[in-house]
């Protein structure tokens, strides 16, 4: 007996072939999935590495930008300090801007010190520093203008001072000339006395006067002199001081009779016996009579009489009284 198994054998081979094909497909799918997974892992790893590199680059760039901003801020601060110390007017001007400057600098510093500062904030810091630099340029121009104006004012003051000094000098010179001229006129206007006559006088009961040199009989001294003509002296009232010195060398001065003191041109205070006033007419001679009676006896000896006007001695004379005889 014989069997034919060929058809059955073909069926088993087909099944085996189908099973192998399924395995191949599954294997291919697994390989593809594995490759895709590896590819994603490699891509993600590269992406992460790139992101880290980008972040590191951003941090480096941020630090570099901050360092540059800090340098620019420091430079601006140095320029401001230099302006403040350049002159008083600069310091005065900047003091009025201190609040604005400090606020601007404070904002820039806060951005620089911020570890997480964004690009927008860094850009803001750059704008603020540019604004600060612009302000510094403006302040510099204003200070330069003030310096020029101050220099011009100083020069104007110097010129005015020179002119004032020149005017003062001319005034002083002119005034000195006037003073000298007035001094000459003043001295030249001083009167001069001449033709002195000085006598002891006895008043008689009849009212008549008798000249005597007997000291016991003398009731008064009578002085006559002439005031010479003077074409410089203006007409008007003139003070004449009569100074009598007794034989004992003491000035004759009785306050109750009008005696006093006056100042000579040497600045010396001198006692006078009697002061009279005359009405002088310019350019004319004038006779003057002066009498002196005192409340005490006259001494024997020489009486010296000096006449003063305008602080100067203008004349003098003497009168000698003698001791009377037995019947004096």
Image (cartoon, rainbow, N blue to C red):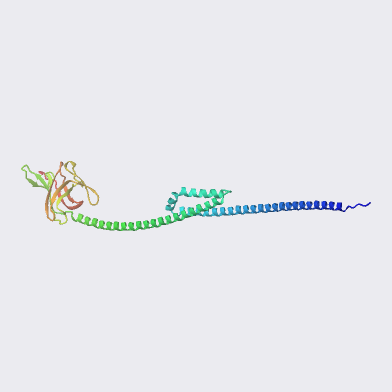
Q: Residue 271, image x and y in percent?
A: 21, 46
Q: Front-most of 313 and 321?
A: 313
Residue 27, given in percent of the width and then of the height, sits at 77, 52
- The single residue placed furthest to the left in the displayed view is 206
Left or right placement of residue 20 versus residue 127 in this view: right
Q: Nearer the viewer, residue 185 or 130?
A: 130
Quarter of the image with the C terminus in it: top left
Would residue 121 be found to the left or right of residue 94 on screen?
A: right
Would residue 248 be visible to someone looking at this image?
no
Q: Residue furthest front?
A: 1
Q: Nearer the viewer, residue 151 or 283?
A: 151
Residue at 11% of width from left, 52% of height from top?
287
> Residue 132: where, in percent of width, then height?
48, 53
User: Exactly how many numbered labels are in the figure?
Assistant: 0
Residue at (80%, 52%) from the top-left corner? 18
Visible residue check, residue 276: yes
Q: Residue at x 54, y 51 (%)?
A: 120
Residue 214 is situated, as x and y percent measured from the top left of the image, at 12, 46
């Amino acid at each position: 007996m014989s069997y034919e198994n060929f058809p059955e054998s073909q069926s088993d081979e087909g099944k085996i072939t189908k099973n192998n094909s399924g395995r191949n497909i599954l294997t291919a799918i697994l390989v593809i999935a594995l490759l895709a997974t590896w590819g994603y892992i490699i891509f993600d790893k590269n992406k992460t590495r790139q992101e880290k590199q980008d972040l590191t680059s951003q941090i480096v760039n941020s630090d570099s930008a901050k360092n540059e901003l800090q340098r620019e801020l420091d430079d601006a601060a140095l320029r401001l300090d230099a302006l403040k110390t350049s002159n008083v007017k600069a310091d005065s001007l900047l003091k009025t801007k201190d609040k604005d400057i400090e606020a601007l600098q404070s904002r820039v510093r806060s951005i620089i010190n911020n570890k997480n500062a964004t690009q927008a904030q860094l850009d803001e810091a750059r704008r603020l520093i540019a604004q600060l630099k612009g302000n510094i340029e403006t302040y510099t121009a204003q200070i330069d203008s003030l310096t020029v104006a101050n220099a011009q004012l100083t020069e104007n003051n110097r010129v005015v001072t020179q002119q004032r000094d020149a005017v003062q000098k001319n005034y002083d010179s002119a005034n000195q000339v006037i003073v000298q001229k007035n001094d000459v006129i003043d001295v030249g206007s001083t009167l001069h006395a001449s033709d002195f006559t000085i006598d002891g006088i006895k008043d008689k009961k009849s009212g008549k006067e008798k000249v005597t040199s007997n000291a016991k009989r003398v009731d008064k001294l009578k002085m006559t002199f002439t005031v010479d003509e003077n074409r410089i002296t203006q007409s008007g009232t003139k003070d004449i001081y009569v100074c009598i010195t007794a034989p004992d060398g003491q000035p004759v001065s009785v306050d109750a009779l009008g005696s006093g003191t006056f100042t000579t041109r040497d600045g010396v205070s001198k006692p006078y016996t009697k002061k009279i006033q005359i009405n002088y007419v310019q350019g004319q001679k004038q006779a003057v009579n002066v009498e002196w009676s005192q409340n005490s006896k006259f001494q024997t000896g020489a009486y010296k009489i000096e006449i003063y006007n305008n602080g100067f001695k203008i004349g003098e004379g003497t009168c000698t009284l003698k001791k009377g005889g037995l019947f004096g």
